[in-house]
Image: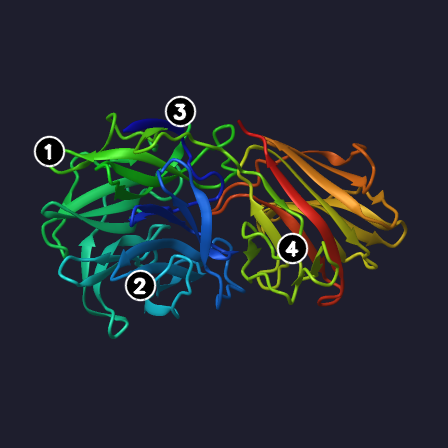
Amino acid sequence: MHHTPIKNPILRGFNPDPYLLKVNGTFYIAVSSFEWLPGVRIYQSNDLVNWQHETDILTTQIDLRGNPQGGSIWAPQLSYADGLFYLVYTDVKSTKRPFKDSHNYLITSSSIHGPWSEPVYMNSSGFDPSLFHDMDGKKWILNEIWDYRLTTGNKSAGIVLQEYNPEQKKVAGPVYKIFDGTELAKTEAPHIYRHGKYYYLITAEGGTGKGHAVTVCRSEKITGPYELDPQYPMLTARDKPNSPLQSSGHGSIVQTDEGKWYMAYLCTRPLLGKAAILGRETAIQEVYWTEDGWLRLVGGGNAPAIETEIVTKQAAEQKKDTNFYDEFNGLLKKEWNTLRILADDTWCDLDSRPGYLRMIAGESIQSLFEHHLLAIRQKDFHFSAVTKMDYHPTKFNQMAGLILYLNDSSYLYAYITSDEEKGRVIRLLRSEKNEFILSPEKIQVEDGEIELRIEGEGAEGQFYYRIAGESNNWHPIGPSQNLLFLSGGFTGNFIGIAVHDMNQIAGSYADFDYFKYQGLDE
């Protein structure tokens, strides 16, 4: 056996709500994608130490147009039985209180790479569905239940359980309320495991922010009643303001071939103690079962650990490679994400100009429908991103460029546009929680290809430009920008390229020669 030291998080950047699964010696983690597509990212590992982005599951027949900020694909859960992978997930259509329209679906595939079946509708009573395959062959769907009658802001009212009939492809029979939650409240993310004589229910409580926690309870019958862990919560940073990992919760567990147990959970690393620019990330820690049958962290206590270790069969070393480069030859790299619509040849064209990506303009930066943006997760506090582009706008309301994008309320955009007096210009705009600021500076640039670059270092970021072909002659675009506002909500910051045309639908296009991201964290 080898004891491999690692540092958390194991999945850097926006990778929330992890569900950890082992199938035939291979480990998988499924994470939430929210309004970003393809939906449900899957990471794969042979040793729990190093992970690779293996595939994405929701790649066809998914349309999230009009879904609200922070809605769409929540808390996927992956399971394996009967020679099939099962995925359950929520598509959140509305989050306006007091109600929440959260529709739960199930799909299956014989391979993690698909093809996946048509979605089977489960219910809409609450989010975070989970599927449990019992030893007697029965299958059970769990989910948080949302009660609009509650006077609290968060209206999660506990966990419900109902049998799923795979032949009829629907839930049926009585609905069992198996857990009301504790005073930590906001109970969600239910997962059931069978260990020894008990069914164990692992839940998230306290909300996905500073109060987040993992709470465990158990029962000899799957339908309850469930006994609460007397030392709950079993993992949390809610009372540990100096912990480098915050907002820790939403746990799932797995047993290795060596007999060790591990829990994956989400966490954040807030800059200056307040701004989680990278979003909610995924961490891992070893856990064990006590003699009296409760789940505990190896090493004692209930604190998330930024330094821990994994027991492996073979010698291993944790590696970090967050770099990304796309020269736009052939197919788009799978790392790319889009907002609410999938990238397809109606607006992402790799054939019209060989060696370039031609992006047809979409609607505005704040559109919830046709936003033509390609972006990747920011995975490092210190990073560099650069692109080379060719764009010839003729109107002031046509724009294309390099963007930092948290959501439709908060973004930072260096772009090429047209000005009535100066012609083709580079400008910088900023939206901070819906407060829009357009920099007065207009940088006149002649026709030809332009390179745009962003250098981010913690809380500060600086945009630059140069005429393509100039060697190391970078010019700043406006002053250095404070980036702390690119945090909050359910996602993390993304870095990408975009084209917008508010003069005419598909009225312009930009050609991008390459996009390169370098992660500079140690």
What is the spatial separation of the Cα atoms under label 2 and label 1, in whole angstroms? 37 Å
Residue drawn where x is 57% and y is 35% of the image: 484
Q: Is mark 3 on a helix, strand or loop?
A: loop
Q: Name the residue under label 4.
A: 365
Residue type, mark 2 in image: Ser
Q: Position of residue 216 (x, y in %)?
A: 21, 42
Q: What element carries label 2?
A: loop
Q: Which residue lies furthest to the bottom in this view?
A: 168
Are the residues tagged 4 and 1 within 8 Å (C-beta)? Answer: no
Mark toward the start of the polypeptide (4 vs 2):
2
Q: Where is residue 201 in the image (x, y as percent from the top left)?
A: 21, 48
Q: Residue 513: in sight, yes or no? A: yes
Q: Mark 3 points at which residue?
A: 242
Q: Residue 240: in sight, yes or no? A: no
Mark toward the start of the polypeptide (3 vs 4):
3
Are the residues tagged 2 and 1 within 8 Å (C-beta)? Answer: no
Q: Name the residue under label 1.
A: 291
Q: In which quarter of the image is residue 85?
A: bottom left
Mark toward the start of the polypeptide (1 vs 3):
3
Residue type, mark 4 in image: Ile
Q: In which quadrant will I find the N terminus?
A: top left
